[in-house]
Amino acid sequence: MVESAKKHDSQYTYSDYLSWNGNERWELIEGAAYNMTPAPSRVHQGVSVVLLSIFYGYLKDKSCKVYAAPFDVRLPFENEKDEDIKTVVQPDIVIVCDKSKLDDRGCRGVPDLIIEITSPSTSRLDLKDKFNLYEKVGVREYWIADPNGKTVMVFKHGEDGRYDRPDMYAEEDEIPVGIFKDLKIDLKEVFNE
């Protein structure tokens, strides 16, 4: 398994992040920099486009908004100023229901739902580092989609502040979206090549 490259062991902030080469995609998790280059595979992007279009169609006339990477999600610690924020991620798909968290730079605060689509270079980051981060900050629902295995794990934030045991879905299943009681996503459509 190939891992995402870390830039250095140094601690970085959003101010540093904004100054880096625009030809590369980076994420910061608690000050550690992760290089997200190169671009995702065609299959990864296909899954992303289908999920994005389903959510977009559903949310078209609703207050929640859906965004796709690259889209900065800044996760400040307490009242950190933007330039001092040490965690900036670019999830594959983000749903934000509180419009006060949205600005011209993306999202400042915790989204309601995040979907990460794994690839060989990001699976460790998605399954461990981002899982721990999203659980810690309180993302209500976290999906990890595996285009190769045609599966999706759905983690929901429990009353104890931790993710419950994941609901597991395969290609022939429908996923009920926990934050929207009247939406189900057919994985046959998502994983159809």
Image (tube, rainbow, N blue to C red):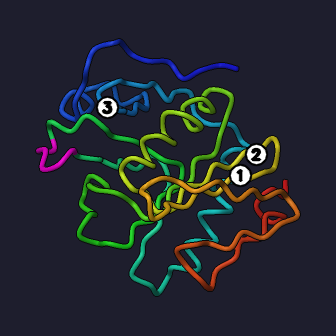
Q: CA distance from mark 1 to mark 3?
A: 30 Å
Give the residue drawn at x 46%, y 87%. Answer: 61
Magenta residues (range): 77-82
Q: Position of residue 125 (x, y in %)?
A: 54, 32
Q: Counting residues from the N terminus, which is met first, the one under dot 1 or under dot 3?
A: 3
Could you say whether the residue bearing mark 2 is in a helix, strand or loop? loop
- Check disc 2: other Cα within 10 Å, few if <14, some if 14-19, many if 20+: many
Q: CA distance from mark 2 to mark 3?
A: 28 Å
Q: CA distance from mark 2 to mark 1?
A: 9 Å
Residue under pointer 1: 46
Describe residue 191's horizontal placement relative to residue 59 as left or right: right
Contact flag, marks 2 and 1 (Cβ < 8 Å): yes
Give the residue drawn at x 63%, y 33%. Answer: 123
> Mark 2 or mark 3: which is in front?
3
Q: Position of residue 68 (x, y in %)?
A: 50, 55
Magenta: predominant secondary structure element? loop
Q: Amino acid at mark 3?
A: Glu
Could you say whether the residue bearing mark 1 is in a helix, strand or loop? helix
Against 83, residue 59 (above or below) is below
Could you say whether the residue bearing mark 3 is in a helix, strand or loop? loop
Name which quarter of the figure residue 184 lies in.
Answer: bottom right
Against 125, residue 111 (above or below) is below
Outermost front residue: 160
Name which quarter of the figure residue 6 lies in.
Answer: top left
Outermost right residue: 172
> Mark 1 or mark 3: which is in front?
3
Which quadrant would the N terminus be assigned to in this image? top right
Give the residue drawn at x 35%, y 32%. Answer: 28
Residue under pointer 2: 147
Residue 30 circle label: 3
Looking at the picture, tell me which residue is in the foreground, 17 or 134: 134
